[in-house]
Image (tube, grey):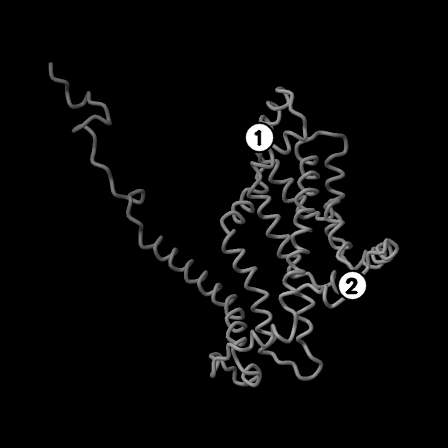
């Protein structure tokens, strides 16, 4: 017996109406295309605005000393002097400055990763009286400027006999001195389901085992972000080494760049060459780790 057309189901064959090509169709409307184009134009303009000083710095590093200060501005160097870099590195021990900075950054990164992750685990995965109050007190220390504690810390480190070494800059990182890193990791740890820790506790796992074998492997994006932030901080740190480091052979790159600046006759082409050499590792590091960095920032703060 043949079924009447009116009895066919809405999704069965000939009885269903043809799909419409309205606003929900696969084709983008001209309004959406215009909005997307405008957004990209604004982003390109902002990128060019922020990238222009970087381009000027790189080009100036290949100019003569007179062209670096010429008005109107000479954008393209003529002649193209590649010798500014070897002359600068021959006049100052820049490779030593690079090595000092890498060692300083490496030690502090280890300290921050160990101490901040442990403290963040206690603030996010353990329940104890006054936990949130202590956490908020810790966050309040972020508004305390470094110069407010500079003199008492200097007196204390002088009594320890640490002045002239990197110990005042490296040792505190092993005791949770990086509040921002602790906050960042704590927010990321809170996105990890609590059921994973509960299941491990039922199986008899200790808290340190849960921290080391469950939480840390899942927090690789956040840990990579902390490493990147700490590396950039150490790479750009000027005030700390200026206060505690007195021997020129122990200078980091930030103090080494300051040696190029003369009192009256500064060669700005050399200054830009040193700045370009100092900026290159940061730019390369960001491009190599930008996916992990963005992932860590995106996932941080969304409580699971």
Residue 74, horizontal then vertical, whole percent: 50, 82
The residues bearing labels 1 and 2 have C-alpha atoms spaced at a distance of: 44 Å
Residue of label 2: 243
**For residue 193, above or below residue 246:** above
Q: Quadrant of the C terminus?
A: top right
Neighbours of disc 1 within 10 Å: few (<14), some (14-19), many (20+): few
Identify the image quadrant of residue 136.
top right
Residue 238, horizontal then vertical, whole percent: 70, 64
- Determine the secondary structure under disc 2: helix
Neighbours of disc 2 within 10 Å: few (<14), some (14-19), many (20+): few
Mark identifier at residue 193: 1
Q: On the rendered structure, is 270 left or right of 264?
A: left
**For residue 287, above or below residue 174:** below
> Residue sitting at 71 percent across and 47 percent down?
179
Foreground: 199 or 22? 199
- Determine the secondary structure under disc 1: loop
Name the mark nearer the viewer: 1 or 2: 2
Mark identifier at residue 24: none
> Residue sitting at 73 percent across and 45 percent down?
176
Q: Quadrant of the N terminus?
A: top left
Residue 239, horizontal then vertical, whole percent: 73, 63
Foreground: 99 or 227? 99
């Amino acid at each position: 017996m043949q079924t009447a057309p009116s009895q066919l189901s809405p999704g069965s064959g000939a009885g269903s109406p043809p799909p419409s090509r309205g606003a929900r169709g696969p084709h983008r409307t001209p309004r959406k295309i215009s909005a997307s184009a405008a957004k990209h134009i604004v982003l390109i303009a902002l990128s060019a605005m922020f990238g222009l000083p970087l381009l000027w710095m790189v080009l100036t590093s290949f100019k003569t000393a007179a062209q670096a200060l010429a008005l109107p501005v000479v954008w393209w160097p003529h002649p193209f002097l590649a010798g500014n870099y070897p002359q600068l590195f021959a006049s100052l021990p820049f490779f030593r400055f690079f090595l000092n900075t890498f060692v300083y950054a490496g030690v502090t990164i280890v300290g921050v990763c160990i101490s901040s992750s442990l403290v963040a685990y206690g603030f996010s995965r353990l329940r104890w009286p006054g936990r949130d109050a202590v956490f908020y007190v810790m966050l309040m220390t972020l508004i305390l400027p470094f110069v407010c504690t500079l003199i008492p810390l200097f007196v204390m480190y002088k009594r320890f006999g640490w002045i002239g070494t990197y110990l005042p800059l490296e040792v505190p990182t092993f005791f949770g001195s990086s509040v921002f890193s602790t906050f960042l990791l704590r927010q990321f740890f809170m996105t990890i389901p609590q059921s994973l820790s509960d299941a491990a506790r039922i199986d008899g796992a200790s808290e340190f085992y849960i921290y080391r074998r469950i939480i840390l492997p899942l927090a690789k994006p956040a840990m990579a972000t902390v490493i990147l932030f700490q590396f950039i901080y150490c790479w750009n740190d000027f005030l700390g080494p200026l206060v505690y480091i007195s021997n020129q052979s122990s200078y980091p790159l930030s103090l080494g760049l300051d040696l190029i600046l003369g009192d009256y006759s500064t060669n700005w082409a050399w200054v830009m060459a040193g700045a370009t050499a100092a900026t290159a590792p940061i730019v390369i590091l960001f491009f190599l780790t930008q996916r992990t960095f963005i992932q860590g920032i995106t996932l941080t703060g969304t409580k699971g």
